[in-house]
Amino acid sequence: MMVMARAQKVRQVDFLHPDGWREVQVVWRLAEGGYKVRLSLLNRHGERRLGYDWHHGKAAHRHYRGAESPYSFTTAEALVDDFARDVERLRSEEEA
């Protein structure tokens, strides 16, 4: 009998900012190597304004204010740092 290896969730954050913006971060380490990622920032109306994701069949990419672009993944730590930097930038742009 073959046992399927499972993905390991290495990060899960669901944070509601006092002003109504919401961050959702989920990162899995895949048993076969690599990661599956879903990082999102939703505005107070529930609209996704920022996202980093990749999954089976699609390379790493970033959504910023509706535009999709490739993302060059290096480490999970750098990914979270890049997302945090974009969160601050986007929130300051949209609040201005």
Image (cartoon, rainbow, N blue to C red):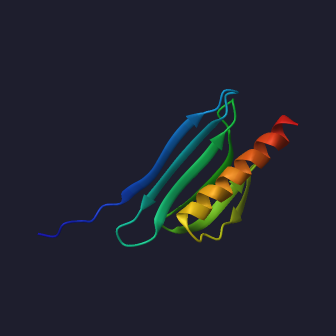
Q: Residue at x 71, y 64 (%)?
A: 69
Q: Quadrant of residue 48?
A: top right
Task: In the displayed orientation, state which residue is furthest to the right.
Answer: 96
Toward the viewer: 1 or 10?
10
Toward the viewer: 34 or 78?
78
Q: Position of residue 19 (x, y in %)?
A: 70, 27
**Quadrant location, the N terminus:** bottom left
Instruction: Describe residue 86's horizontal placement relative to residue 5 as left or right.
Output: right
- Picture layout, residue 43 above or below residue 84: above
Q: Residue at x 78, y 48 (%)?
A: 89
- Picture layout, residue 30 above or below residue 86: below
Q: Position of residue 6 (x, y in %)?
A: 30, 61
Toward the viewer: 3 or 29?
29
**Quadrant location, the C terminus:** top right
Q: Quadrant of residue 59?
A: bottom right
Q: Residue at x 52, y 57 (%)?
A: 37
Task: In the displayed orientation, state which residue is furthest to the left.
Answer: 1
Q: Position of residue 27 (x, y in %)?
A: 48, 55
Q: Residue at x 72, y 53 (%)?
A: 85
Instruction: Describe residue 59's horizontal placement relative to residue 18 as left or right.
Output: left
